[in-house]
Amino acid sequence: MTIHILSPQLANQIAAGEVVERPASIVKELLENAIDAGATDIRIDVEKGGAKCIRVSDNGSGISKDELALALMRHATSKISSLEDLEGIASLGFRGEALASISSVSRLTLTSRTEEQDEGWQVYTEGRDMSPVVQPASHPQGTTVEVLDLFYNTPARRRFLKSDKTESGHTEDVVRRMALSRPDVGFTLTHNGKRLLHCAAGKPGASAASRLAAVCGKDFADRAVYLEWPHHSMQMSGWVVPPQPDGKSFDVQYFFVNGRAVRDRVIMHAVRQAYGHIPDGGQLPGYVLYLELEAEQVDVNVHPAKQEVRFHESRLVHDFICQGVLSALNQNEATGLPLEETAALPVTDWLPDNRKAAGGNSFADPGSHSSGGPGGGGRGGYQPEGFNRQAGRAYQQLLQTPGATPSLPLPEAARAYDSLMLPGTDYRLLAPVRQKYALVTDGDGVYLLSLKRAWQYLLEYRLSAKGDNKPVSQPLLMPVRLKLNRDERELLRLWQPDLERTGIQFTQDAHGVVFSGVPAMIREQTLTSLLSNLVEWLSRESEPEADADSARVSRWLAANCEYAGVKDMAGLAAFCGQLQGAPDALISEDGKLKPGQLIQIPLEEYTGMPEPALPG
């Protein structure tokens, strides 16, 4: 078969396969058009689950007579006109595909009247082959779209429709989402003449709280906790239901991005991670959340159905959502769940790295946020087991927790490159070699300094420090959960004082352990693997002696943490800056460098030297 261009009718049917999945997807597209047209009252009438009839009427601005037929053409829209508009979409619809796709698989009637017109006009089209016919019609200001006999010309697709009850249920869910996203718009939904949902229009600027009980049910509204979570250009608000003592969950899991209902795996993962105690595949208690951010920071042009989005800084958004939900759960006055229930799921590879978000809390002070606003506040009066408020404070400490000792400021380091000395020694650093060595001299010879071994000595020194210099536990934005058997949990209980002296904080539950804090200097490690190996090592060690074995833990951590290496002189200067506050880290009692750090070499041979064996 030769290559040829598809006819417009066939192209529309192919597009309909992406846009028109079932009756509910038609209702979604038509509701978006109505809201974009400024409607304040929308009525949806459905018959036979939507397979027989879907009728959506609104009181929006309407479509003029001259544009009625044009509205049914593919890629015809009034919402964008340039690439700049596409990069900052403010409307719900923008692709110009909905009406063309719907009309290609149904018998469609579009009736509308604008404020300027004295009468309404109607356009009718049937399937992919019929040209639109425009004629006068009686109609108030606004638009009515009637879709009859869905998939009448594609029997194979019609057979994939479910029962009327199932299809009407999907339609009701779509309308509920829209009603929650726009409390200032009235919605009425009927199925076979029976009213399923009615939400009166609120005043302009009405909050979603006024609609929460009507859409999600009074029980959900009574149990939900309100949250507000701002951060610079991002703002999240809404309701989350804490874990219930009776295990009750709600079929309410709605998330809105800039007023658009979305189902995004980054968002879903973040929310589930906040509910860390819920097993994979388990039903979450329920939530209704609204995320507002700059339109340029989110791409909604991912799929024709417009239910998926792509964030420019997905890791930052992920951590922001997770921390916000977790904060609301922890600050709920009526809860008492310990931190072990906040365990984190592993962050999967599809989350792009963002060190700013992963390495520290760049979000606003959680103490300034509200968790007792409209619609929540723990009015149920229950006392479930699980979160406690102290667990949430761990995340506030991220703003105050001191990190690793500051390195030498780069401008000062740059001036010192020509005389960069290894603190506490007579060795001058000349250059980094293969990232894990430094070429050094004492004036009499040239040596290779194992930076990895020196770093391990420094790390052990920091982890073993006492008094004011003892390691400070830095709360993890995403706690690490390990599933352990009873013997392993008992083992960790015995070692807990020594682990805490090195800065490792954790709590236990019936299924495992949750590490909530680690010393700042190992925060960048792959913690799940490192902590799992730590537990395995402890199982092989003899039981700890009172107040004596934190040094064993420090030594093991120093030997098993991965060393990132040094790429340039600035890195060497930074390393020396860290040593300034640890004068004895590399020096033994006899005043010499500790074993395994230094090898004397002929200058011309240094590039071929292997890494020196490290003492056990």
Image: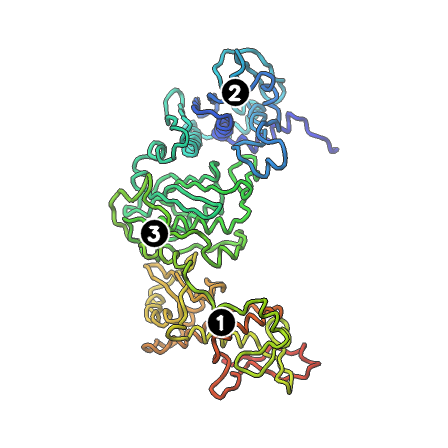
Tag 2: residue type? Gly
Q: Is residue 436 visible?
A: yes
Crowding near pointer 3: few (<14 within 10 Å), some, many (20+)?
many
Secondary structure, mark 2, is: loop
Q: How is the image coloured?
A: rainbow
Tag 1: residue type? Asn
CB contact under 8 Å: marks 2 and 1: no
Q: Nearer the viewer, residue 302 or 104?
A: 302
**Is 123 rendered above or below residue 415?**
above
Q: Quadrant of residue 596?
A: bottom right
According to the picture, the residue beneath numbered tag 2 turns out to be 62
Could you say where residue 61 lies in the image, as x and y percent from the top left?
A: 51, 21
According to the picture, the residue beneath numbered tag 1 turns out to be 560
| Mark found first going from the N terminus, 2 or 3 | 2
Q: Is residue 431 left or right of residue 476?
A: right
Could you say where residue 574 lies in the image, as x and y percent from the top left?
A: 55, 70
Badge nearest the viewer, 2 or 1: 2
Residue located at (39% from left, 44% from top): 228
Crowding near pointer 2: few (<14 within 10 Å), some, many (20+)?
many
Residue located at (43% from left, 30% from top): 175
